[in-house]
Amino acid sequence: MTSSATPRHLPPSAANTASALTLPSTSLPDDAVQVGRIGDAWGVQGWFKVVPFSSDPQALMGAKTWLLQPPEQGNKHFNGTLSLAVRRIRWHGDSLVANSADVTDRDAAQALRGARVFIARQDFPPAQDGEYYWVDLIGLTVRNHQNVVLGQVKELLSSAAQTVLVVHEDAGGNAKPIERLIPFVDAYIHSVDLPSQTIVADWQPDY
């Protein structure tokens, strides 16, 4: 017979972790945008870390309700879409941490680890004049001052210096699209017209 003066704390099983979740099920709206994911549990009172997909996560921090879906890879402790009512979210050093009245302990918080966080686009706070949400720029047609179509915005890249539009022009047939990287700064961007889905840029096809 053996004994130990130090108790062992075993991690909860996947079933026990899943049972810690008591969030209501919902459906994902057509205008849902993924804005981040949930990280590790933080502390023992149900707080958890949040990994935003934006350096300025206004939509994430301003929304009162998050829509959660399980991670695409790794352990999944729930299926479908869950609704999470956010009670508090704040910066803790370089990390975002949040809690909810429906997530009361560390087990429940850990069950959310890796969950993808979505917010309906209509719930985003209004953008300031001259500012745009990236999701609104994706798919816009880019033209220059000569009305030459340069392509459509496929994605945006961010660096410490500036944001860059990744613009693809169809090259025809099975050829790879022509890719252009246009800095999203006043020196090159003349106008953004969301209703007409058009960006006018001071850029030439052979740049």
Image: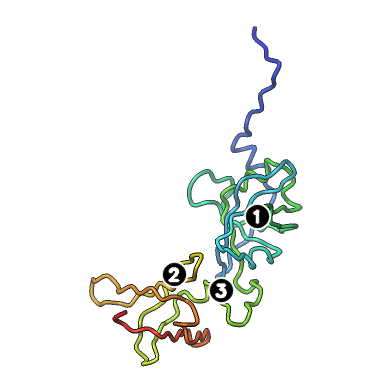
Q: Point out the tag, 3 or 2, that comes first from the N-terminus.
A: 3
Residue 191 shown left or right of residue 87 in the figure: left
- Residue furthest top in the image: 1
Residue drawn where x is 49% and y is 78% of the image = 185
Mark number displayed over residue 96: 1
From the viewer's side, name the closer residue of 154 and 23. 154
The residue tagged with tag 2: helix, strand or loop?
A: strand
**Residue 204 place in picture, x, y as percent:** 34, 84
Q: Is residue 69 left or right of residue 98?
A: left
Q: Left or right: 111 with respect to 143? A: right
State the SS at label 3: loop
Q: Which residue is mark 2?
A: 155
* Residue type indicated by callout 1: Leu
**Mark 3 neighbour density, 10 Å: few (under 14) some (14–19) many (20 or more):** some
- In the image, residue 187 sits, relative to residue 67, either above or below, namely below
Q: Is residue 11 left or right of residue 180?
A: right
Question: Residue at (63%, 56%) from the top-left corner?
Answer: 82
Q: Is residue 17 above or below residue 145?
A: above
